[in-house]
Amino acid sequence: MKMMTLTQTTVAFVLLLGVPPASAQGTLALPTSKLTQNRAPEAIGRATTASAAAKSAGKLAEWWNDLGLSVAVNRSLHEQDQNVASLLSSSGQPGVLLYAQIERVNGPGAPVYYLVGDRVELVGSGTTAEEVYFASAQRDRLVPARTDAEFDLDHSYFMWVTRSGKTIQVKNIPAMFVVYPTAQKLSDAKLKESVNAASDAQALSRAVDYMELTTRDASIKKRIAELKAQQSETNRQVDKIESDLQQEMERVRKAQAVSNRLATMAMVLTVANQVATASGYLGSDAGPSINDARTPEELKASVGKMLSTAVQRRDALEVKYRAAADQQSGQRTQYLQILTTGKYPTDSVPQIRK
Amino acid sequence: MTALTRRSFVNGSASLLLGRSAILRTGASALALTTASREANAWVMAALAIGSMVAGLIANNNRSDGGAMALLTANYELLKVALRKLDHIESQVVEILEDIKKLPDEIDRRLKQENTRRLEIELNAVIVGYIEKLNQKDPQQSFADWRVSKQTMDDVRGLLGRLQKSRQELKTEGMIDPATAIVVSPLAIVEHSLLNILQYRPAEIAATLNQVYMPWFDAILDPKNSMSAADYADGAASRLAGLMKRAAEHPLGKALSMRPGSTLLVGVGVNDITPAHKEETNQSVCTGRNYSSLEELEQETELPRPVSFRATPGSGVRYPAAQEANEVCRPIMRDVGARIGPRDRLAQDAILTEKEFVAPSGKASGLMLLDLMLSPERRGLAGTSDVPEDKQSTVVNADLRDPGARAAFMHKSKAWTDAHKSYEEFAVLIDAINAERTRFAFGMAAMVAVETAKHNINQIIRNYGR
């Protein structure tokens, strides 16, 4: 056995396979061949424990059996039952994600399949299967891998465990449906930041709400209430700054776009058309000095002034934004402290523990 | 608007390219290759210059709300006016896209996506359908009632379905070129109008505008996208800068400093001169002597040769026969001075002007194009004001008394043909400059159209958010 860095390897593997391009609507089009071959049937099982629910999903159990993995999967799920139940009741999150990752050894005959690490991995609890995996994939972790084994994404899949009353429901999700989008997200830093921040904030918010609702410690309740009030004010400030910043960045973008092309415009267009083009492009941001410019030189000076003013404002807002974001970060730290004090299972909620 | 043809373009654009066409037809040294290229550039200029004007109309229309407010305030007449205006513009877009399809240059390949034309045709059909629907309204029925009637909703739902189906099926993610830009910006406004009339929830309308059109607009405006309108405009600007540099380094560009004006293209001249020489008179000088043979006579005598001789048997050569024996006669020569005829000169200028492109409809476009022309030939005698000084001309002496022969001689001279070859090279550069200017104007106008639509849609989204 050797140790492999799981997340990096998986993501690299997926990227090598080629991340399918995002369509205009941002949904992922998976390669058809990947969808049709060797995919586990979609199945939902319901029972009082996760392992029993998985077993009750008939087609799913058959699938494991065909791969020769039903004993290993059932044993591992059984071992995780307690942890899963505990997380479902103590995290305040809607679900728990399990990952049955498969590795394949190609021998002289038929390939042999194994569970990576000989167990179903408990990824953690959180908002959705994709978001939990995404948060978890931010961290590298070491897993044992068999010599000559290859990760087999086609045969791997996730189980998303939720609870409704006393019933535990397990839904299987082909790994590629989660891993491909995750790889896509990881390859897009901007998207990663926004999705990360939004889903993590949602997870933290759920945890805090849950703590506020369930704790019997009055001081914790009080601290949470105070922090929430502070946070609300900070969020309001951040929203305002973000909105102003967005507008200012838009102004900078437009002024930059016009400024970059003024020299060519002066060569190609009549003065009236230069002014009309600049005014049209800048819209309501074009002040009278741009709309009433009478020479290319006047136009250049006015656009230059607008650009430098917008850049200054943008820079000032960025400083304000960073200060407000620091405040938010401080509040997050305080929330985490409260969660720790209240014995919240922070380490098992990847979206929070980072 | 009539369909744009090369003929209507050339006729309609006054003298701007007419002069060039005349030169192309008559230019003695026009090369086949460059002629083809210049014809191609003329097409680019024709189609895209008008395209940029239509894009300007679209930008103006996008600046308005395309009838959104008329809808909200239940102003039936205003909505009809807005839609008719849009229909008129879109009909022009259909024609422009037809013309763009014929552009020969590889640079413009991105403008010729079939899906853009199909999207435009669908958009146009939806606008026409929308207008028809409005026209069918019973005058007795209030606009508010008409708007919410089942029949109206069903018909408008059909129009929206058709528009959305085309948008979704035509794989629009790669369509970010300027030609698509002038289609997509009104598309957004029309779709919004239809969603609004169907009373979609504000959040849904805002989501459609935000998720479908805003990223589309951003991609069109992003110069980092290699097929975008912004990249098209910037590519033209970059090529234009390179061409301007090349033109400024060309001898004619240097002489003109690449500014409107004129410069001497070529001056040639012929000095009609017959050099000084000797000429026979009709008088002779005779000397007498006997020669034993003709050879002896030839050895001794000098030119000019004797006018005649006769051999007399037994008495040697007697010459000339008519004269006395032993006498040689030679004609008397006289000096003739040089003849100085006319000092004929021929010159031609290259004229560079810059004019605003005027569409066949007579509408000025705001686009400035260069026009390079040859002046009429100037012919006159050296030293007169009609022709350049001799130090600026290539002059040769030749015995050419006939004025027609002198003109033909000057037209065939190396200096004249070399200068016209250089002119043709420069003209090709000027045409390429004009083509890139037009491309820039088209790309920029398309960007303005999208930017104004983006601004407008942003405001609509904000309004829904309130």
Image (cartoon, rainbow, N blue to C red):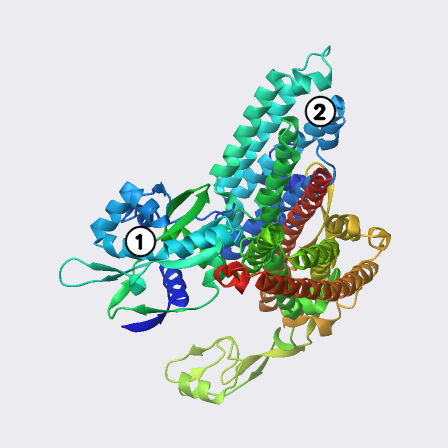
Q: Secondary structure at mark 2?
A: helix
Mark sitting on residue A154:
1
Q: Within the image, what quadrant is residue B335 found in? A: bottom right
Number of callouts: 2
Same chain shared by disc 1 and disc 2: no
Left or right of A28, for residue B254: right
Which quadrant is home to the N terminus of chain B?
A: top right
Chain holding disc 2: B
Q: From this viewpoint, which residue is outermost toward the left?
A: A109
Mark sitting on residue B80:
2
Left or right of A47, for residue B366: right
- x, y percent for residue B260: 75, 60
Q: Secondary structure at mark 1?
A: helix
Point out the frontmost of discs 1 and 2: 1
Callout 1 amino acid: Asp
Callout 2 amino acid: Lys
Chain holding disc 1: A
* Mark 2 nearby-residue class (10 Å; few <14, some 14–19, many ≥20): some
